[in-house]
Image: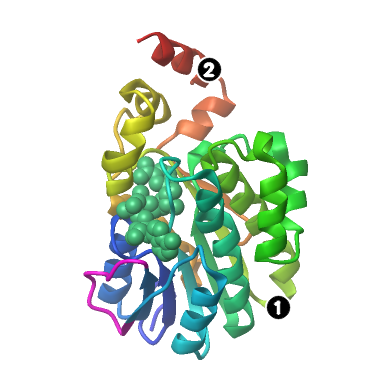
C-alpha cells in the first residue's frame, strides 16, 4: 500500500447520486476503497453500502451514521443544493446538515483521516463576511444554526453563496481545532462544472455570461472527474500535512482575480447588459 493508495481505506461519501460525488465515488471504488455512500437518491455506483439519507434532516443523518457505523479514514462531502430551491433548504443541505453530518463522523475518524468538502468559487470572497459566517459556525447545533439563518435573511439571501462561505469558514476553523487530534479538514472551491446542477438549475437563474465569467481564464467548465481527483488527493495519505486549505479548483480563476488579470466585476457588468 502506497501513500497514494486507497486499498484498505474505509471512506464515506455524501451526495453520490450524480455529478462530482458520483465521479468521486467511482474513483474511490476504482482505487480500492471500501466506500459507503448516502444521498436522497440511489447512487448508480456499485459500492460497499448505500443508504438514503437527507441532509435537511438531522434524524435521517443520525440514522445513516449509526447504520454505517465503525471508524473511517475519509469523509467526502459532495452533496449540495442550488439556489433554485428555498433559501433555508439550501442552507440546511449545504451548511447546517453538512456540518451536523461531519460532526457526527469526527469521533469516528482514525488518526490521519481527512474531511474533504466541496464549497464553490461562489465563495471566493468568503473573507468579506467572515464575522457573520463565524458567528453562524459557532452556533452549537442544527436547530440553533437554523434559527440564526431565519433571523438573518439579509445575509442568507438565496442561500447559495452564503452557505458556501459558511462551509468554508466552518471547515477552516475546525481544521485548526482538530489538528492535534490528527483529523484534517479541507474544502474545494470549484469553478463551473458540467453536472446536473449546472444544466438543470444554475443556467435557469443566471445568463451564460455569468458562468463564462467564472470559467475564466481557461474558458471552459470542468468535468466532474476533474473536480473528483483533488478531493481524492486531499483525503489521501499523500496530503498528510495538508489541512485548513480552501483550495480553488478553477484552472487559474482565483489566481487571476488576486493578481488583477481577471476583473470579475467588469465581466459580471458585461453579463448583466448582454
Ligand atoms: N456544478 C457546478 O458548477 C458547481 C460549481 C461549484 C460547486 N459545486 C458544488 O458541487 C457539489 C456537487 O454538485 P454537482 O455539481 O455535482 O451537482 P449534482 O446535483 O449532480 O450533485 C449534488 C448531489 O447532492 C445530492 N443531494 C441533494 N440534496 C440532498 C440532500 N438533501 N441530502 C443528501 N444528498 C442530497 C444530489 O442527489 C446529488 O447527488 C455541490 O455542493 C455544488 O454546490 C457545483
In this view, 160 is above or below 231: above
**Closer to the camera, 119 or 146?**
146
* Closer to us: 250 or 80: 80
Report how far apart the C-alphas of labels 2 and 1 lie in the structure: 41 Å
Characterize the magenta stretch by its predominant secondary structure: loop
Question: For the point 56% across and 49% down, which residue is it?
Answer: 88
Q: Within 8 Å: ligand 1 and the Cβ of disc 1?
A: no
Give the SS element for disc 1. Answer: helix
Residue 83 lies in the magenta-colored region: no
User: Label 2's element?
Assistant: helix
> Relative to residue 157, is residue 59 depicted above or below?
below
Give the residue at x 71% y 37%.
Answer: 129
Residue lying at the far bottom in this picture: please name it.
70
Tell me if I can see residue 216 in this picture: no
Question: Is 47 covered by the magenta stretch?
Answer: yes
Residue at x-position 60% and y-position 64%: 99
Circle 2 sits on which residue?
265
Frontmost residue, 24 versus 234 = 24
Q: Nearer the viewer, mark 2 or mark 1?
A: 2
Mark 1, residue position: 181
Amino acid at each position: 500500500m502506497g501513500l497514494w493508495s486507497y486499498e484498505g481505506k474505509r471512506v464515506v461519501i455524501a451526495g453520490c447520486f450524480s455529478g462530482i460525488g458520483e465521479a468521486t465515488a467511482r474513483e474511490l471504488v476504482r482505487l480500492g476503497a471500501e466506500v459507503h455512500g448516502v444521498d436522497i437518491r440511489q447512487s448508480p455506483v456499485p459500492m460497499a453500502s448505500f443508504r438514503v439519507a437527507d441532509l435537511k434532516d438531522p434524524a435521517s443523518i443520525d440514522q445513516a451514521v449509526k447504520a454505517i457505523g465503525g471508524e473511517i479514514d475519509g469523509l467526502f462531502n459532495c452533496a449540495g443544493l442550488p439556489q433554485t430551491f428555498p433559501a433555508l433548504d439550501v442552507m440546511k443541505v449545504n451548511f447546517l446538515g453538512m456540518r451536523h453530518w461531519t460532526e457526527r463522523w469526527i469521533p469516528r475518524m482514525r488518526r490521519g483521516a481527512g474531511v474533504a468538502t466541496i464549497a464553490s468559487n461562489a465563495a471566493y470572497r468568503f473573507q468579506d463576511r467572515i464575522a457573520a459566517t463565524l458567528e453562524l459556525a459557532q452556533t452549537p447545533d442544527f436547530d440553533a444554526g437554523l434559527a440564526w439563518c431565519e433571523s438573518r435573511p439579509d445575509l442568507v439571501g438565496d442561500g447559495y453563496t452564503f452557505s458556501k462561505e459558511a462551509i468554508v469558514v466552518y471547515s477552516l476553523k475546525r481544521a485548526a481545532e482538530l489538528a492535534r487530534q490528527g483529523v484534517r479538514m479541507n474544502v474545494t472551491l470549484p469553478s463551473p462544472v458540467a453536472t446536473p446542477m449546472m444544466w438543470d438549475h444554475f443556467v435557469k437563474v443566471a445568463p451564460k455570461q455569468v458562468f463564462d465569467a467564472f470559467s475564466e481564464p481557461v474558458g471552459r467548465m470542468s468535468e466532474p472527474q476533474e473536480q473528483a481527483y483533488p478531493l481524492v488527493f486531499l483525503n489521501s495519505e499523500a496530503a498528510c500535512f495538508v489541512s485548513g486549505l480552501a483550495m480553488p479548483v478553477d484552472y487559474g480563476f482565483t489566481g487571476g482575480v488576486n493578481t488583477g488579470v481577471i476583473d470579475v466585476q467588469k465581466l459580471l457588468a458585461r453579463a448583466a447588459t448582454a
